[in-house]
């Protein structure tokens, strides 16, 4: 899985780089006036910022699809209600089937716990030991799911950090060139041309800040969704363990009542 994600990321970067520089040289450069012409004057770092933006958009779309898929099919509260009812009447297999059909991050964690419980049903007579194993299985599944959610978030975090710096670098280079031309002209450069050169340089800062802002918002949004997934899994684990415990107590009480 990690290798697959790295491959996806590198392919995305190379394609974005090729597309960005193609647009920069074949679209921006050919424009004689207007905003596209001004962007071309901003220098090659504009293309680098475009690359960052294209990678950002691609990863955001990929993560959004992945997180929507992780929510599964159907309503989670209804799933939990049905699974608890199955557990209460000892129908573990039916509960597992419902979890598999729901196909969400939460149901996957529940499945891990119930499968561990079923596998220990005959080999482990101690109920408390089985419950501990169930909790452990759910925790392991939750950690795995969490690591999957955080996949490909590193590029977003990186872009949020470096986009502003790239923009500032482009602006700095542009300012150096502008004042270099001013010094060559003996300080008598046309004010309108100088202000135009500075304006072109500032396109880099605007592009860098805009990209960084979008990346930061996306990062915070995805982090919030990861926190939600983790919370739901913890809540589900607590409910499953409680249901198993109550079901066990009810079974013991029923047996004692029948014996008496």
Image: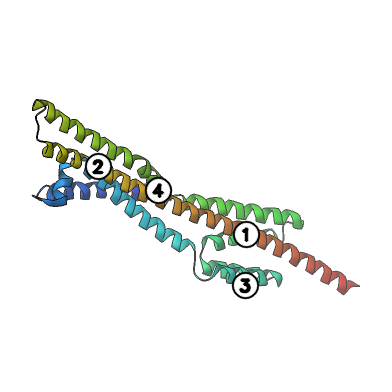
State the residue at coordinates (52%, 70%): 101
Disc on the earlier residue, 4 or 3: 3
Q: Which residue is mark 1?
A: 235
Residue 42 left/right relative to 4: left
Q: Which residue is mark 2?
A: 204
CA gap, disc 2 and disc 1: 47 Å
State the residue at coordinates (75%, 65%): 246
Disc on the earlier residue, 2 or 1: 2
Nearer to us of marks 2 and 1 is 2
Residue 101 left/right relative to 257: left
Colour style of the rendered protein structure: rainbow
Residue 43 left/right relative to 108: left
Q: In terms of secondary structure, where does tag 2 sit?
A: helix
Q: Which residue is mark 4?
A: 216
Disc on the earlier residue, 4 or 1: 4
CA gap, disc 1 and disc 3: 15 Å
Q: Which residue is mark 3?
A: 82
Residue situated furthest right in the rendering? 260
Q: Are marks 2 and 4 in contact (CB under 8 Å)?
A: no
Which quadrant holds the C terminus?
A: bottom right
CA gap, disc 2 and disc 4: 18 Å
């Amino acid at each position: 899985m990690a290798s697959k994600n790295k491959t996806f990321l590198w392919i995305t970067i190379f394609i974005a780089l090729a597309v960005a520089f193609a647009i920069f040289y074949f679209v921006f450069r050919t424009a004689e006036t207007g905003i596209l012409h001004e962007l071309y004057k901003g220098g090659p770092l504009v293309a680098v910022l475009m690359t960052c933006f294209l990678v950002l958009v691609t990863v955001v779309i990929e993560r959004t699809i992945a997180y929507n898929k992780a929510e599964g099919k159907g309503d989670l509260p209804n799933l939990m209600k049905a699974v608890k009812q199955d557990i209460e009447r000892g129908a573990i297999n039916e509960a597992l089937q419902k979890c598999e059909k729901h196909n969400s991050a939460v149901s996957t964690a529940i499945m891990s716990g119930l499968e561990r419980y079923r596998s220990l049903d005959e080999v482990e007579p101690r109920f408390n030991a089985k419950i501990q194993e169930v909790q452990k299985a759910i925790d392991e599944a939750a950690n795995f799911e969490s690591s999957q959610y955080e996949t490909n978030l590193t590029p977003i975090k990186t872009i949020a950090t470096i986009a502003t710096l790239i923009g500032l670098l482009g602006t700095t280079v542009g300012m150096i060139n502008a004042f270099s031309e001013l010094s060559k002209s003996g300080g008598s450069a046309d004010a309108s041309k100088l202000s135009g050169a500075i304006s072109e340089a500032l396109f880099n800062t605007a592009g860098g800040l805009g990209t960084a802002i979008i990346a930061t918002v996306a990062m915070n949004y995805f982090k919030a969704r990861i926190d939600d997934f983790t919370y739901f899994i913890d809540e589900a684990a607590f409910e499953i363990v409680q249901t198993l415990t109550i079901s066990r107590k009810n079974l013991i009480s029923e047996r004692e009542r029948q014996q008496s």
